[in-house]
Image (cartoon, rainbow, N blue to C red):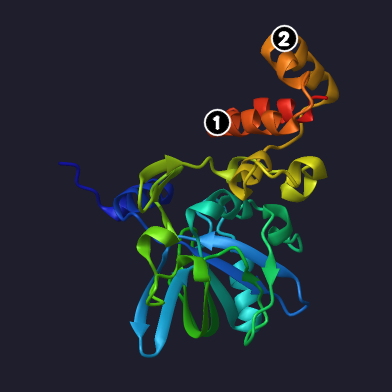
Amino acid sequence: MLTIDPKEIPTAKLHAYLLNAVAPRPIAFASTIDHKGKVNLSPFSFFNVYSSNPPIMIFSANRRVRDNTTKHTLKNILQTKEVVINIVDHSIVYQASLSSTEYPKGVNEFVKSGLTMCKSELVRPYRVAESPVQFECKVNEIIALGDQGGAGNLIIAEVLKIHIRSEVLDENHAIDPLKIDLVARMGGDWYTRSREGMFEVPKPLRSIGIGVDQIPEFIRNSSILTGNDLGRLANVEQIPTKQEVEDYVAQHMKVRELLSGDDRSQVHQRAKALIEENKVVEAWKLLLAK
């Protein structure tokens, strides 16, 4: 048996042990706004519900282990004391992951992730329209657990209003666990889908994804590609060049045959399959080919 004294190992290694052992963890997809009206959207997996009366949820915006900085979410909440906690289902998991990219302050992660801003009724932060359940919350208290990298900041949020998409309800207006299709965080790149099991989502923190807003409109408006597909396409650092696309087409006869037809939906179907095979760059080249 491996026995560890938390004080005797690096914080990053301790962090990995904690996240891999305490899992699966639900995801608080937190929408905030600063005093100037700039919005922010970011997922947090140190999260759960702790009380029903009053309805209280708590998530932690930890200080970054590598440099002891804090996220825009925490800074915004300190200013406004409001947050919307959006629940993440499988249909938006790649877009939620993309939103955790460390874009500069002022960049709208709704736009970058391709998600829809929906006006809240009682608080200023926007809701994620695609989220199956959205909680408008006031922040009652913020508890700092330390001042070093890895230290948590417990955000104690009281639910003021709940919005539930009708698609996830059963005939008795209860949430159907199969319909809601929730996902949760494991360690590393791993997630788990409640009704199917584990899958990987590459961490966007390794690069700055271009964002869904930079995907050409004819791809973005595809009737074949889902929000998750667009989220994966948007997680590349740069779009393949015209020369790279031409070389790709020249090297693949089956691609040339596919492109020779008039039905672009077949191209998008093949691109979708490539994305599902984790061949995102190849999917890009196919979609950009004329």
Identity of the amino acid at label 2? Gln
118 lies above or below 242: below
Indicate the quadrant where residue 176 lies. Answer: bottom left
* Mark drawn on residue 87: none
Residue 178's quadrant in the figure? bottom left
Image x and y of residue 217, in percent = 81, 45
Give above or below for 8 relative to 276. Answer: below
SS at mark 2 in the image = helix
Looking at the picture, tell me which residue is in the foreground, 147 or 256: 256
Q: Is residue 126 left or right of residue 62?
A: right
Report the amino acid beneath label 1: Asn
| Residue toward you, 89 or 171 | 171
Q: Give the position of the N terminus as an image quadrant.
A: top left
Q: Residue 175: horizontal and vertical position, in percent?
A: 40, 70
**To which residue does mark 1 refer?**
278
The residue pinned by badge 2 equals 251
User: Residue at (54%, 43%) from the top-left corner?
Assistant: 203
Q: Residue furthest left?
A: 1
Badge 1 crowding class, 10 Å Cα cut-off, few under 14, some 14 to 19, many 20 or more, is some
* In the image: residue 176, left or right of residue 283: left
Residues under labels 1 and 2: Cα distance? 20 Å
Q: Is residue 86 visible?
A: yes
Q: Position of residue 73 (x, y in %)?
A: 61, 68
Instruction: Locate residue 160, reporting x and y percent.
Output: 52, 87
- Residue drawn 66% across and 44% down? 230
Q: Residue furthest bottom?
A: 53
* Mark 2 crowd level (few <14, some 14–19, many ≥20, 10 Å Cα): few
- Observer-nearest residue: 122 or 146? 122
Please tell me which residue is depicted at 72% across the width and 26% down the height of the picture: 286
How many numbered discs sit on the rendered protein? 2
**Left or right side of 170 for 253:** right
